[in-house]
Image (cartoon, grey):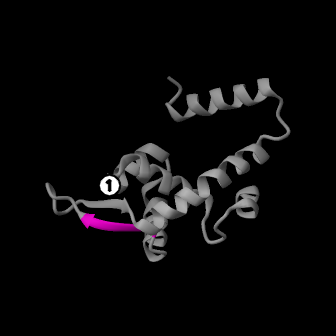
Amino acid sequence: MMIFQEMSCEPNLTAPQFITLCTIQSMVSCSITDIVSATAVDQATMRGVIDRLKSKGWVYLSEDLKDRRKVMISLSVAGAELLKKMIPCAKDITEATMSDLNPAERLALIFLLKKMGSGGK
């Protein structure tokens, strides 16, 4: 987390918020349950993350047209612009995070992270 905060192009953006914004961008419009499933962050924590993203104007909430009880989350224009600015920065953060690993260790780490993310499948 320290590397992320030090190298981020946006000082008010945390790593969990960045991950959430990337997830929302990839899904276009999604529910909090969708985001929880994609990120493995618990629902209570994710609600806080979404509230902070909304207060910063990076996402907006709307009702699902099919189920009015369901809240849909989408990137705002400001959120999309932030991601456009952050993606190159995130690549530098990843490089700094893995700088002490040799190529084989990097591949092994990426393989293990993907395996963990897919539930070990």
For label 1, the crowd category at 10 Å Cα-Cα, with few meaning under 14, some 14 to 19 and many 20 or more, is some
- Figure quadrant of residue 50: bottom left
Amino acid at pointer 1 = Ser
- Of residues 16 and 9, the one nearer the viewer is 9
Give x and y (percent) for residue 59: 41, 66
Residue at 49 percent across and 75 percent down: it is: 56
Give x and y (percent) for residue 88: 64, 51
Q: Is residue 76 above or below residue 23?
A: below
Query: Which residue occupies the extreme bottom position in the image?
Result: 55
Q: Is residue 78 above or below residue 90?
A: below
Q: Is residue 9 left or right of residue 6?
A: left
> Which residue is labeled 1 in the image?
31
Residue 60 is one of the magenta-drawn residues: yes
Residue 71 is one of the magenta-drawn residues: no
- Of residues 48 and 104, the one nearer the viewer is 104
- Decide whether the magenta segment is chiefly helix, strand or loop: strand
If the image is split into quadrants, where does the N terminus sit?
bottom right
Residue at 70 percent across and 57 percent down: it is: 4
Give x and y (percent) for residue 31: 32, 55
Give x and y (percent) for residue 62: 26, 66
**Label 1: element kind:** loop
Residue at 49 percent across and 31 percent down: it is: 118
Q: Which residues are magenta?
A: 58-62
Q: Is residue 114 above or below residue 2?
A: above
Q: Is residue 52 left or right of residue 16?
A: left
Residue at 85 percent across and 39 percent down: it is: 100
